[in-house]
Image (cartoon, rainbow, N blue to C red):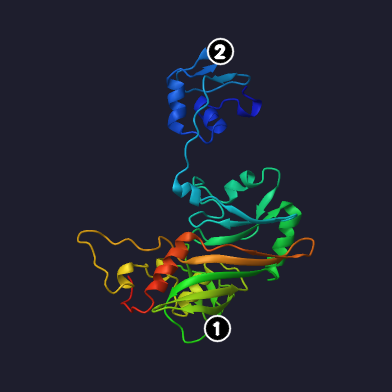
Amino acid sequence: MVERDLAGIRLFDLLARSHTDAYRGDLRQLISSGGVSVNGEVRLHDGKLRLGDVVMLDSVPAARRRTAKERRLEPVVLAETPSALVIAKPAGMPSVPDRSGKEASVHGLLQTLRPDDDLRIVHRLDRNTSGCLILAKGADAARHFDVEFSERRIRKTYVALVAGVPTWDERAVDAWLGPDRRRPGMVVASSKQMTGFREAYTQVLVRERYGRHSLLELRPTTGRGHQLRVHLQTIGLPIVGDQPYGGERLLLSRLKAAYKKRTGVEERPLLERMFLHAEQVVFSDVDGNEVVVKAPMPEDLAVALRHVDKHRSQRRTQCD
């Protein structure tokens, strides 16, 4: 029965709302084939419904099979406490909706993740960054985590594969970050304070050196937008796959000496996104207990890293 808050909804929209796992084409076919009745009469076309209308279906639409891409874009719960949920955000999914509001985001899935909890996003990861994301349960928990972040008590660890092999094992990056006026939405670094720029700090450690790449551990103490990407670009170690900030595509032809290109076929990169993963987060819960959560490295990054490791002794020219 159509409730008051749904009065005026179109028939197709009601079916799509009630059967979210069905193909939209199947729902339209169900209507046009006479499989839907309104108030006991077959309805062969879409149209607005009124308060109190009773909608009946002859059969339940079959659930569609999720595509591999859709399965990859499902957040996985890594840990849960009385006041927080920590998920593994998949690469390709923004933390909050874009301006169009049409794309799936973590924010749009909060009610699905825990229908009975008032989940709130308290920090963000870039769209193509995977890994640990903290969700607060309710307003009080959100305020707690806001304070924890503002006072820099939450410890985050990232891993990144970069182009270049540094001679040092550990160093700090201290560069002010602000908007790039030539590229809206992008960020630039400055060695000194400027109007609109904010201080940013990142500790960088070398985990592994390869032929012409390095796997770095990153420990930011501030959380500025694009901070890690710009800081690494600033010290000449751009993240692999991060082309907006000087990162190279990871191509097998540039790793494997005996690689033979196929005529007329464009080579696909070994990785479809930048190699940046939020590996671990450590925080104090509302009750004061320390919580340590680690997100496993996603398969796409692990596969790319295996290729780099396999061909580490074969030096090639700069990737494009």
What amino acid type should be assigned to the residue bearing mark 1? Answer: Glu
* x and y, in percent, of residue 99 in the image: 51, 50
- Indicate whether 188 appears above or below 295: below
Q: What is the residue that sits farthest to the right in this orientation? A: 287
Label 2 to label 1: alpha-carbon separation: 73 Å
Q: Marks 2 and 1: CB-CB under 8 Å?
A: no
- Indicate whether 250 appears above or below 141: below
- Indicate whether 317 appears above or below 263: below
Decide if residue 116 is on the left or right side of residue 278: right
Q: What is the residue that sits farthest to the left in this orientation? A: 263
Callout 2 secondary element? loop
Q: Which image quadrant for residue 163?
A: bottom left
* x and y, in percent, of residue 72 in the image: 49, 52
Crowd band around label 2 with a 10 angstrom C-alpha radius: few (<14), some (14–19), many (20+): few
The residue depicted at 52 percent of the width and 19 percent of the height is 58
Crowd band around label 1 with a 10 angstrom C-alpha radius: few (<14), some (14–19), many (20+): some
* x and y, in percent, of residue 84 in the image: 70, 56
Q: Where does label 2 land, which residue?
A: 40
Asked whether residue 247 is in view, the answer is: no
Q: Determine which of the numbered discs, if any, sits on residue 170 in the image.
A: 1
* x and y, in percent, of residue 208 in the image: 49, 78
The residue depicted at 70 percent of the width and 47 percent of the height is 118
What amino acid type should be assigned to the residue bearing mark 2? Answer: Gly
Q: Nearer the viewer, mark 2 or mark 1?
A: 1
The residue depicted at 77 percent of the width and 60 percent of the height is 286
Q: Which image quadrant for residue 266?
A: bottom left
Callout 1 secondary element? strand
The residue depicted at 47 percent of the width and 65 percent of the height is 302
Quarter that holds the N terminus = top right
